[in-house]
Image: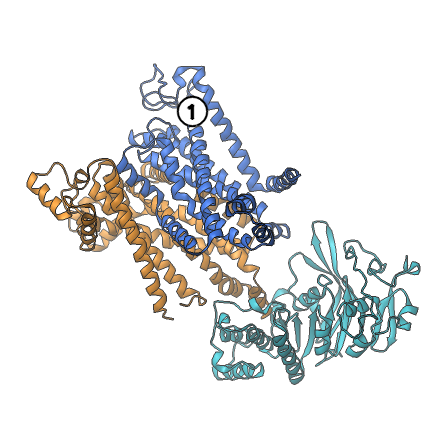
Chain colours: A orange, B blue, C cyan
């Protein structure tokens, strides 16, 4: 069912929130101690280059004009020049974005599917030994400290057993030597395994617990009794009537827990030297590369908001009760 | 008399709480960490070399495994790992509890005001909460750290609290909304009580149990964020925390050589957050009679 | 032979304090096309009887003794797969809270089709849509609304859809458990007429459960009054409604105030409900009975016949036969 009004409303909402974040960031950069010029323009540049950049970003103009130029520059894709790379930041972060999206979507989707499946089973066998084992393990997964867990995986699976590479995203030799595409894809997947496993395990716990409690509350609903009274088999009741309703709140919570997953994603990228936005942000912050840090932050905010939007639309599509 | 009633209610709640396996395990783990935190005050008194930050064993120049003098071994400059671990417990409690406390104070105030006032104030406060809720707190802390330089522990605590109130305020708001039209609130309004008095005298006592429940979950979040920040090298450099210990293992390249150094700090972070989380789940069952009944009937 | 005959049925719930007997030695018969109403306050065991007839007792409930003979089979002995053949096909149920009885994420017609297809997997598409049309006509829902989702229906329409679902496979017995409680009075009236009309048209056996004796009397030919897990009075609608004999029935009718006879009827204070945990042969109503006297103490109640169709369960035959406190 198409719900164009609803989609439009959500888009406007996301646009407004992003604008608020954009504005807040502008003022943070201007109000923090130190001179804004030194934050946006690399002091190591030649005076001519510096003058050009200052002019481009309007750093010599009054505050309100600076703000308008900042907004304009953002929408035309000019986010400044990185101190460290000496290149426009937009080209740097676009290159990183694909790796973050690869890691993020695979781990979230996998964890959500497996978590929902296992949560369903745990709730169905509530109070059994299987349920207890699954719930406790999920609780442990959920509270694991991500960097520590990542380091343990790296140490055991990567270093001790040598199953996976210790970091990076590709083997340089393979890419220089013009290997066939399938070998390259397998190489990337091989590098993906450890960071993927880390994020998968952490997210799995929360999805399992959510699905379990959601399923338990759905199972006490009257329409489950109706389904039983129709003479449906237990399997149909569980998989068709209960699971679909129970999965709805889980989908909402995917949106709410995105912030949590982004934190974990940045830490995971950092430990496995996965060249994504999170690692780039940490690098930029550690090296006082302000334009790069600002761009990474804006991109992360944009990714979070878009993911939230997707979750909202998915929810609206699955729940017939939402109509706008 | 009122106090007696609350004591009784508290006692009954505690009875249910302690019978819950999750709650019991949580309390036991917390107890162990509490003992560790208290011990951290006494360990440096035994010998200055057990000071977690400055105590260097003169005989040891590099990281060594467990021994009689250093039960968990030492780090690469000869500092005692156990002493650091005990100090870390103290820091984790301070960070977790104070950040959680500030965030429930902010969250409860905002939630009560939004729910009680309604209208535009409610809508704008809740939109603000929505925005903050979708922002990843660690990323925000990193950006702020890059702009303002290294933070001390209290500023970190305060920023975590600022980032973490929205979930609390949402729950408190809906609770306030349901209380707002109860007869006893309406009656006191008719009797001429001021808004401030109604909020603090009548609404607050009724939402506080819920706020405390949420506090345990906030503790978990705060400990994890502080540890992650320290791990990335943006923690308070004058405090030994578990996250910082992990950073030292990692940055000094000992993570593949010194499991006795790698395992304890991360295990402590994970266990402490697990304990608080269990506590929260158990409290959830005490406070939610529907859940309790379900548990009883099978 | 009757369609349904329940003999000596006792059902208990395992609770923390011990076994609670929710249904205690119940017996009744139902002929084909007949209607029987159960009335009593909440917790008297009437819903438990309905659930037992559907094989849907909760996990902590247990049939302690007795038989449920239905079309020549003892339902108590059925295994779960056998039950699934019966449920929805031969015995169907209209539930207490129609508001949530339909699954919110599926269209209504799909949920009703599901009931048919489950029991007649070979049905052709043409037959299926023909049957659906019949059903929606029968319960007066416009065919155009068939594909709607439950939230697009009004409360009355939802309840009609639930009735259609119960009728889907042409069952021999329908159990209606408080089917109109959540509805407003006018809709309630329509639905009751609907149920009665459909029941007479299809010659289905009906068991109607309600706390409201007036509602039961408007639908059913015969009425059983229940108290604390036991049937205390049974008779035709006229007998029970016009000349109630058991003190509890009189209390029940008395609490149903009508202006003409307000001064004739004493509404006794209902004391606490009896303890159903202990097994006793003594009268369970004695604690609350307005007519209980010293003679009742230590005696067990017995069935007293007033007419071949009208009986009451009491320790005081004289009282019952006299028909005191005339209404």
Residue A231, position as x, y percentages in the image: 58, 69
Total count of labels: 1
Question: SS at mark 1?
Answer: helix
Above or below, C161 against C283 in this view is below
Image quadrant in which the N terminus of chain B is located: top right
Residue C257, position as x, y percentages in the image: 75, 70
Above or below, C141 against B162 in this view is below
Front in this rendered view, residue C196 or B250: C196
Residue farthest toward the left in the current orientation of the protein: A48
Residue A302, position as x, y percentages in the image: 29, 53
Is residue C308 toward the left or the right of residue B94 in the image?
Answer: right
Res B9 quadrant in image: top right
How busy is the neighbourhood of tag 1: few (under 14 within 10 Å), some, or many (20 plus)? many
Front in this rendered view, residue C4 or B273: B273
Residue labelled with disc 1: B82
* Residue found 49% across the figure and 25% down from its top: B38
Say whether residue C124 is visible: no
Chain letter, disc 1 residue: B
Front in this rendered view, residue C139 or A19: A19
Is residue B189 toward the left or the right of residue C267 in the image?
Answer: left
Residue C175, position as x, y percentages in the image: 66, 72
Above or below, B69 against C100 in this view is above
Say whether residue C147 is visible: yes
């Amino acid at each position: 069912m198409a719900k164009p009004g609803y989609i439009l409303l959500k888009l406007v909402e996301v646009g407004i929130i992003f604008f608020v974040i954009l504005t807040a960031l502008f003022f943070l950069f201007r109000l923090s101690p130190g001179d804004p010029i030194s934050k946006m323009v690399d002091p190591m540049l030649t005076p001519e280059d510096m003058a050009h950049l200052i002019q481009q970003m309007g750093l010599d103009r009054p505050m309100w004009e600076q703000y308008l130029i900042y907004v304009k520059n953002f929408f035309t894709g000019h986010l400044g020049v990185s101190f460290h790379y000496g290149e426009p930041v937009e080209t740097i972060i676009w290159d990183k974005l694909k790796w973050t999206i690869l890691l993020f979507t695979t781990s979230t989707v996998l964890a959500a599917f497996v978590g929902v499946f296992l949560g369903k089973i745990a709730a169905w066998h509530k109070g059994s030994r299987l349920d207890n084992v699954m719930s406790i393990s999920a609780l442990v997964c959920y509270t694991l400290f991500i960097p520590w867990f990542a380091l343990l995986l790296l140490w055991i699976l990567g270093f001790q057993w040598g199953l996976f590479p210790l970091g990076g995203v590709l083997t340089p030799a393979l890419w220089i030597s013009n290997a066939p595409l399938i070998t390259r894809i397998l190489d990337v997947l091989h590098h993906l395994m450890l960071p993927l496993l880390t994020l998968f395990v952490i997210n799995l716990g929360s999805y399992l617990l959510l699905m379990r409690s959601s399923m338990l509350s759905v199972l006490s609903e009257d329409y489950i009794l109706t389904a039983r009274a129709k003479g449906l088999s237990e399997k149909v009741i569980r998989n068709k009537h209960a699971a679909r309703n129970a999965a709805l709140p889980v989908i909402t919570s995917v949106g709410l827990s995105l912030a949590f997953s982004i934190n974990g994603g940045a830490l995971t990228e950092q430990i496995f030297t996965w060249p994504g936005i999170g690692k780039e942000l940490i690098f930029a912050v550690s090296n006082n590369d302000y334009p790069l840090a600002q761009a990474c932050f804006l991109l992360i905010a944009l990714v979070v908001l878009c993911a939230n939007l997707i979750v909202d639309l998915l929810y609206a599509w699955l729940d017939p009760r939402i109509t706008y | 008399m009122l106090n007696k009633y609350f004591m009784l209610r508290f006692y009954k709640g505690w009875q249910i709480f302690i019978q819950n396996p999750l709650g019991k395990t949580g309390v036991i783990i917390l107890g162990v960490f509490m003992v560790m935190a208290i011990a951290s005050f006494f360990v440096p008194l035994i010998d200055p070399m057990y000071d977690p930050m400055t105590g260097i064993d003169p005989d040891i120049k590099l990281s060594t495994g467990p021994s009689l003098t250093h039960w968990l071994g030492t780090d690469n400059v000869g500092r005692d790992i156990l002493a650091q671990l005990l100090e870390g417990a103290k820091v984790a409690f301070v960070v977790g509890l104070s950040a959680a406390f500030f965030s429930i104070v902010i969250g409860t105030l905002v939630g009560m005001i939004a729910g009680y006032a309604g209208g535009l104030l409610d809508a704008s406060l809740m939109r603000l909460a929505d925005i903050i809720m979708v922002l990843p707190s660690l990323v925000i802390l990193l950006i702020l750290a890059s702009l303002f330089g290294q933070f001390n522990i209290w500023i970190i605590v305060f920023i975590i609290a600022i980032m973490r109130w929205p979930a609390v305020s949402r729950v408190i708001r809906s609770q306030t909304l349901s209380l707002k039209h109860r007869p006893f609130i309406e009656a006191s309004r008719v009797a001429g009580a001021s808004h401030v008095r109604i909020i603090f005298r009548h609404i607050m006592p009724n939402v506080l149990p819920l706020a405390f429940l949420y506090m345990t979950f906030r503790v978990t979040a705060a400990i994890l964020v502080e540890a992650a920040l320290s791990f990335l090298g943006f923690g308070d450099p004058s405090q030994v925390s578990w996250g910082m210990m992990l950073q030292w293992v990692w940055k000094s390249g000992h993570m593949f050589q010194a499991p006795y150094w790698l395992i304890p700090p991360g295990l402590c972070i994970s266990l402490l957050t697990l304990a608080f989380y269990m506590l929260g789940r158990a409290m959830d069952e005490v406070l939610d009679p529907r859940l309790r009944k379900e548990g009883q009937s099978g | 032979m009757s369609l349904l005959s329940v003999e000596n049925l006792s059902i208990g719930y395992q609770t923390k304090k011990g076994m609670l007997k929710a249904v205690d030695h119940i017996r009744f018969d139902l002929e084909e096309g007949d209607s029987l109403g159960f009335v009593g306050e909440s917790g008297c065991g009437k819903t438990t009887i309905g659930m037992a007839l559907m094989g849907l007792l909760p996990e902590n409930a247990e049939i302690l003794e007795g038989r449920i003979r239905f079309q020549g089979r003892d339902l108590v002995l059925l295994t779960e797969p056998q039950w699934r053949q019966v449920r929805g096909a031969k015995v169907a149920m209209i539930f207490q809270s129609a508001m949530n009885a339909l699954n919110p994420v599926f269209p209504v017609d799909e949920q009703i089709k599901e009931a048919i297809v489950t029991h007649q997997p070979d049905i052709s598409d043409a037959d299926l849509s023909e049957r659906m049309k019949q059903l929606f006509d029968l319960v007066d829902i416009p065919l155009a609304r068939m594909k709607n989702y439950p939230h697009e229906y009004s409360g009355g329409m939802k309840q009609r859809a639930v009735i259609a679902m119960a009728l889907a496979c042409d069952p021999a017995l329908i159990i209606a458990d408080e089917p109109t409680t959540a509805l407003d009075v006018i809709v309630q009236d329509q639905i009751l007429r609907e149920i009665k009309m459909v029941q007479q048209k299809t010659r289905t056996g009906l068991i109607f459960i309600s706390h409201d004796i007036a509602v039961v009397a408007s639908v059913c030919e015969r009425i059983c009054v229940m108290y604390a897990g036991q049937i205390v009075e049974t008779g035709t609608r006229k007998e029970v409604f016009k000349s109630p004999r058991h003190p509890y029935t009189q209390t029940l009718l008395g609490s149903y105030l009508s202006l003409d006879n307000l001064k004739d009827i004493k509404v006794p204070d209902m004391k606490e409900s009896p303890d159903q945990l202990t097994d006793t042969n003594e009268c369970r109503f004695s604690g609350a009975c307005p007519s209980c006297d010293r003679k009742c103490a230590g005696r067990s109640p017995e069935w007293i016949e007033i007419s071949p169709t009208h009986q009451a369960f009491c320790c005081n035959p004289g009282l019952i036969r006299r028909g005191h406190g005339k209404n």
